[in-house]
Amino acid sequence: MKVLATLLLSISLHSPYHLPAAKMPVDHAVAQHPARKGGRWYFAENGHAVYCYGPVRLLPQAEGGLQRVATFCQGDKNVVPLRD
């Protein structure tokens, strides 16, 4: 009896007669960069221009020197080495 009840319940839950959930309208300009303003273009070490929102930092290198990097750049890049 429990098997029959479970079967009927699962069929009723997967019924095609349910209404789809209402979707909220999305503003694509806000969805891509929600709270980031005031970025700047930088010349990356690989020769490409990158747009970053964070400050420029100096990071220590394994050889003992310092390297300038831009932080919080477009394309999910947290740190991008800069060309001097």
Image: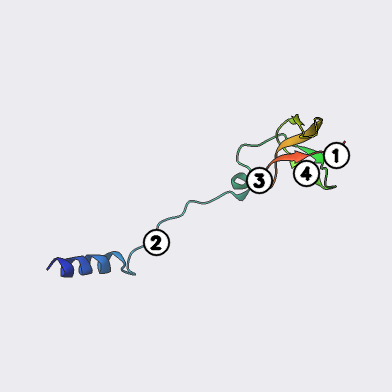
* Vertical comparison of 27 with 84: above or below: below
Q: Which residue is mark 4?
A: 50
Task: Depth check: give the residue in front, 53 or 24.
Answer: 53
Q: Which residue is mark 1?
A: 83
**Crowdedness near tag 2: few (<14), some (14–19) or many (≥20) residues, C-alpha within 10 Å:** few
Q: Which mark is residue 20?
A: 2
Question: Which tag, 2 or 1, sits closer to the chain's start?
Answer: 2
- Residue type for callout 1: Arg
Residue 25 pos. (x, y %): 52, 51
Residue 9 pos. (x, y %): 22, 65
Disc 4 element: strand
Q: Residue furthest front?
A: 63
Disc 2 element: loop
Q: Quadrant of the N terminus?
A: bottom left
* Vertical comparison of 52 with 25: above or below: above
Question: Which tag, 1 or 4, sits closer to the chain's start?
Answer: 4
Location of residue 59 (image quadrant): top right
Residue 40 pos. (x, y %): 77, 36
Colour scheme of this structure image? rainbow
46 relative position to 35: left or right: right
- Residue type for callout 2: Pro
Q: Which residue is mark 3?
A: 76
Task: Depth check: give the residue in front, 7 or 80.
Answer: 80
Mark closer to the observer (2, 3): 3
What is the CA distance from the residue labelled 4 to the residue labelled 3?
A: 12 Å
Residue 47 pos. (x, y %): 85, 47
Location of residue 17 (image quadrant): bottom left
3 relative position to 35: left or right: left
Mark closer to the observer (2, 1): 1
- Residue type for callout 3: Asp
